[in-house]
Every structure is written in structure tokens, then in C-alpha cells.
Image: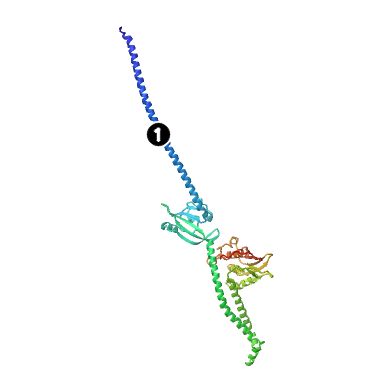
Amino acid sequence: MPTLPVATLLPLLLAAAACAWLLIRQRRQASELRDWQDAYRHIERQLEERTQKLRDINNMLYGEIAQHELTEDKLRKAQDYLASIINSMPSVLISVTATGQITHWNSSAELATDIGAAEVAGKLLWQAYPNLPVDLQTIQQAIEEGVPKVMESTKLVSKGQTYYTDITVFPLIARDIQEAVIRVDDVTMRIMMENRLIQNEKMLSLGELAAGMAHEINNPLGAILQSVQNIERRLSAALPKNSEVAASLQLDLQAINSYLEQREIPSFLRTIRDAGERSARIVANMLGFSRSGQQHAPVDINALAENCLELMDNNFEIEREGGSVAIRLQRQLADNIPRVPCSAPEIQQVLLNLIRNASQALRAAPPADPCITVSSGCDSDQAWIRVADNGPGIAPEVRRHIFEPFFTTKEVGQGTGLGLSISYFIITEHHGGMIDVESETGRGARFTIRLPLQPVTMPPDRS
């Protein structure tokens, strides 16, 4: 076999070596490629696993978010529902901290004070509701002791009106919360009904007392009147027995009567008789006034007015520095007024109240010539009776509320504020009539009662 020269063999060897190196490199690259592919697939699997985990976590988060939103929606609805319940309550509800700062203010509180909840948030209770008689000590005691503090029938004045409330300070029972809830309930109607029941009881007792007094007083009055009548008869020259006894005693009956006339003894006797008869009428009027009942019967309202004036006659004086001044009474009672179907004791009660109010107004600011005028008249279908005075009059802001229960301009203890409201109720509800007031400041006041001439159907008595 021929031997190839080195020059020819060397390139071949180099080419073979290059091919071998290329083959080894290719195999190594293929192996590395497979390793890379395995690593890629491994990473890809890990990425898919992690992506799936992330999806699962995202789905869980979406579920949690949805649940959270649902919980928030339910909580918001519950809060709105609770707020609606609190705001729909007629009671004033105010929650405060232990230092008196307001944390809640319901709609009734807004109506009572004309201040919105947003305006009072964070303010002290006494800044937002200055006339509420709840102090910091009461709030702190309720919170510390865990016992509600109650103030019943508390008098409040708001927007120029007087009303009565029950105030309760409740400790707020909650963890880590030191607050109290103040509830204010308007009990004006309850107080008014209680006072009316008390008044009815008083009137019932007065009726029983008047009946006993009438019997006890009428007995001595009867003896006085009978004795006066007997004295006048025993002094009369027209009776033969008087002349006979005087002659037996050698007395001149005419001379005796002349002496008595000059000493005004008959005038004194007439005064005693008139006073006794007037006292008997007053007792009878008081007895009729105190009788209860709403039975309507035809009544002479002029006679009723005269009875009222006679009952009030001793009250028609004003004390001044120079002495007492009588209140002048004027009667302008029309003739031929038909009898009015009404309850005489109730109408008398109203008239007495109006006359008493007029005399009190004249005493408060006496004019030069104090005068009360009682007049009456008749329209086509109504009879009317008016009580007028020339006193200081009634201011417009007072006149608007004058028939409201418990509204009074008198000093504490001088009046309940029920007289005119009860009078209004008697005239409008019990008699189907009207009562109104006309007044100007400084020019007196005129109260007019109008009663229908035809009987009206009255509601059943629930007293």
C-alpha cells in the first residue's frame, strides 16, 4: 500500500480532527440544548403551577372582596334601617360622650332645636341645646353607675312655647365606649289630661262641699230673712195686734215708727234683707256652678252673665297707693235674646274665667278708669256674649298662643295656663260654638263667645 506524503496526509488529518471536534461540539450542544429544554420545561411547569396558585389566590381574593362588599352592603342597610328607626321616633334622642360632646342627633332633636345633625357634631350638649336641663354630672353618674337617670314632668320652653317632658339619661352599654343616650319625651298632653282629671275631681269635691254648705248657710240665712220680715211686720201700724200691744204698754206706735225712721232703722233692716237675699243667690249660683254634667237645656245667657258678675263682685277692686279703686262694670245686654241650648255650669265657668282674666289684666297695668264691659247680642243663627276690658291689651306673639294648653304669661304659681284652653274646649267641643279674641297692645282685649241657637249633637262624655 503506497504511503501518502505528509503534505497530503496532514490536511486530511486536520479535516478529520475538525470534523470530530464539530461532531463533539454538536453532541455537546445537543446535550446542552436538551438540558436547557428540560430546564425550560421545568421552569414552565413551575410557572404554570405558580400561575395557577396565583389564579386560585386571586379567585379567593375576589370571593373575599365580594363577601366584604356584601357585608358592607348589609352593614350599610342595617345602619340605614337603624337610623330610620331612630329618626322616625317622636322622642328626642341624643348620644353624648362622658365629657358632653354630641355623637348622635336624631330628626326629633333637629325639629326641637332647628339645628341639623351636621352642625352639632362634636359640639357640647349645652351649646346645641341650652335649655335642656341635663348637666355633665348627671351624664357622668349615669355612665359610672350604669343606671338610668330619670327626670319626670320637666318644664321646658322652646320657640316661645311651654311644654312638659320626661327626660331619661341612659348609659350606653358597649365595650370600651363611655357614652350616654339622652331621651326626651313630650308628655304635655299627659300632664294636661292629669291636670284635667285633678280639676274634675276638685270640681266634684266642690260640688259635694257646696251642697253641704248650701244647706248649712241657707239655714241661718233663712232665720235672718225670716227675723227681718217679722221685725218689719211687728213694727207695722197696719197690724191690729201691734197697736193693741202698744196701747197696753201705753206706747204710741206712730211715735215709735217716727223715731225708727229718723234713726234709719227700716233702712238698716232693708239692707240686712237685701244682703241676706243676695247671699242666698250667691250660694245658689255656686251650687249650680259646681254641679257636673253636660246636659244642655235652654238658658238665658243674660241671667247667666248677671250671676257671674254677682259672683265676682267682691273681686272688682284695684289696690293703689292712695287706696283701692273699684273696677267699673258696664252691662250692654241686648233684649229679646232667645234662650240658648247649652250647659249653664260650663258656660258660667267660661264667663267667670274671662271676667277674672280681665280683672287681673286691669290690676297688672291699671288704666285711669278701669272698666269691664259685658255685652250680648244675637245674629241670625247664633247668640254671642262678649267680655271686654280697657287694660294693657295682648301682644300679637302672645295672642297666637293664648288658647294653647299651659301657655301663660303669669308669674310662676299664679296660673296653670289651662283656663283659656279649657274654655276653648268647652265652647268648641261641647257646644259647637266659637271663641275668639281681638286685642291691640295698649287698647284692651275683647273675648267673644258665639253659641248656636239650635241644639247640636254632643260627643259622649268620656271624662
Query: In what quadrant of the picture does the C terminus appear?
Result: bottom right
Q: Position of residue 88 (x, y in %)?
A: 52, 53
Q: Position of residue 174 (x, y in %)?
A: 42, 53
Q: Position of residue 108 (x, y in %)?
A: 52, 55
Q: Is 358 displayed left or right of 94 in the figure?
A: right
Residue at x 63% of width, y 92% of height = 248
Residue at which label 1 appears: 50
Q: Amino acid at mark 1?
A: Arg
Tag 1: Cα neighbours inside 10 Å, few (<14), some, or many (≥20)?
few
Front residue of 114 and 198: 198
Q: Quadrant of residue 375?
A: bottom right
Residue at disc 1, secondary structure: helix
Front residue of 108 and 442: 108
Outermost residue to the top: 2
Residue at x 35% of width, y 18% of height = 23
Up the image or down, 262 lies above or below 1; here it is below
**Residue 264, can we see it?**
no
Q: Position of residue 163 (x, y in %)?
A: 53, 61
Up the image or down, 351 lies above or below 33; here it is below
Query: In what quadrant of the picture does the N terminus appear?
Result: top left
Up the image or down, 406 lies above or below 74; here it is below
Q: Is 96 displayed left or right of 324 in the figure?
A: left
Residue at x 42% of width, y 37% of height = 56
